[in-house]
Image: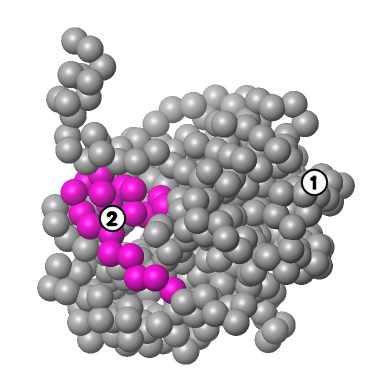
Amino acid sequence: MNAQDLISKLTAPAQVEPDSGIVNVAMYGFTRPGMIAFWSGEGNLPTPEAFYRPVVESFIKGETFYTHQRGIPELRQALADYHTRHYGRAFDPDNFLATGGGMQAIQNAIQMIASDGDEIIIPTPAWPNYAGPLRLQGSRPVEVPMHFANGAWALDLERLFAAVTPRTKAICINSPSNPLGWSASKADLTAIRDFARKHGIWILGDEVYSRFYFGKDGAARAPSFLDICDTEEQLILCNTFSKNWAMTGWRQGWLQAPKALAPVIERFIQYNTSGSPVFLQRGCAAALNEGDAFVDQQVATARRNRDIVVEELRKHRQIRFQVPDGAFYLFFAIDGMTDSLATARRIVDEANVGFAPGAAFGAAGEGFLRMCYLKEETKLREGLARFSGWLETHLPS
């Protein structure tokens, strides 16, 4: 059979799901000599030895067999202790389950709460890895565009709530936001909680970047649903070890959910991956228990780099953006840009700098590019210099 005939035998969602715009640009520029890449959401530091040493020791001990589907007890206790430290109240290990990365956490969550034709509401621009898995399982992501005006993104709660239909199963909130760097206020989170309670729908939360917070209130983390919600209500939080602890390649994450869901999630883990490796979980527990200072260092670097980027791009009148108060991304518009994918590829060709196209984050992201600025300062400044030169040469103000 030829390729088209083979593809025609797949499910309809598998046939029509588009390529990732982020991957498109990354593969286009990946092997170019001297490329400075800002397209991927990861920092430049390798995993610290304090986190990977327990992995090596676990290997030496021969911990290479099947294990607890919910996660080893030591990791789940470390998750509870970590949250107790940072959220100011006690948490129970039974509310946490280890997953094969944040993506498995997301897939398990949406597999549980949304079936064929069901809807999950997502404010956009948004990380595409919620909408894609929903489409692939026959569910429907409902995009609710946020507003960008006067240098700031804003979530229109009336518009968000008006998008709810009888098929709505959840509202998905990513705060601090990838790609926007925007953070929801406690008042916004409370309004969403109250609406979800009233209508009996789930809150699907992504607070991966909660520690990467630069709000004017001086808080050490962003406002959270955990500040205002009970752990046993209709709240599921998806998270990952990737960002805080420089472990993107480990593919380890967790779900935080009501205890009643644990047996259900355990079954999904069994059918999807049959659990996470013990040795990797040992390293994740070490990161939680010993990694607060490292995370603080990462956040300080992100804040400093954010200021460097903002200072440089403010020199260009054709660039518009919100100064991020969270995460480690700058989402910026270029006046006159109508095709972000073509522009991102053009910048690869002409400046040897890589950004992610805004259209990858939903229709509301077209006209923007995303930059991950958690990078080594010398490369950050060089990449900005190249991009500034490209702007001045190709898009004079």
Q: Is residue 145 magenta?
A: yes
Q: Distance between the residues labelled 2 and 1?
A: 41 Å
- Residue at x 56%, y 66% (from the top left corner): 180
Q: Residues within 10 Å of mark 1 (few under 14, many from 20)?
A: some
Q: Do the residues labelled 2 and 1 touch (CB within 8 Å)?
A: no
For mark 1, what is the residue?
386
Residue 178 versus residue 50: which sits nearer the camera? 178
Which of label 2 and label 1 is nearer to you?
1
Q: Picture coordinates of residue 28 (x, y %)? A: 57, 31
Q: In this view, does 271 lie to the left or right of 371?
A: left
Determine which residue is flagged by label 2: 110
Tell me residue 254's x, y (percent): 45, 53
Q: Left or right? Give the position of 79 relative to 304.
A: left
Which secondary structure lies at badge 1?
helix
**N-terminal of the two: label 2 or label 1?**
2
Q: Is mark 2 on a helix, strand or loop?
A: helix
Above or below residue 383? Residue 8 is above
Please, is residue 193 above or below residue 18 in the view?
Answer: below
Q: Which quarter of the rendering shows the C terminus?
A: bottom right
Q: Residue at position x 51%, y 45% from top? A: 341
The amino acid on which the numbered mark 2 sits, given as a three-letter code, is Ile
**Does residue 158 appear left or right of residue 395 in this picture?**
left
Q: Which residue is drawn at 73% across and 69% down?
A: 317
The residue nearer to you, when weighing 389 against 198, is: 389
- Please, what is the three-letter code of the amino acid marked with disc 1? Arg
Q: Give the range drawn in magenta.
A: 128-146
Extreme residue toward the right, this view: 378
Q: Does the magenta stretch include residue 228?
A: no
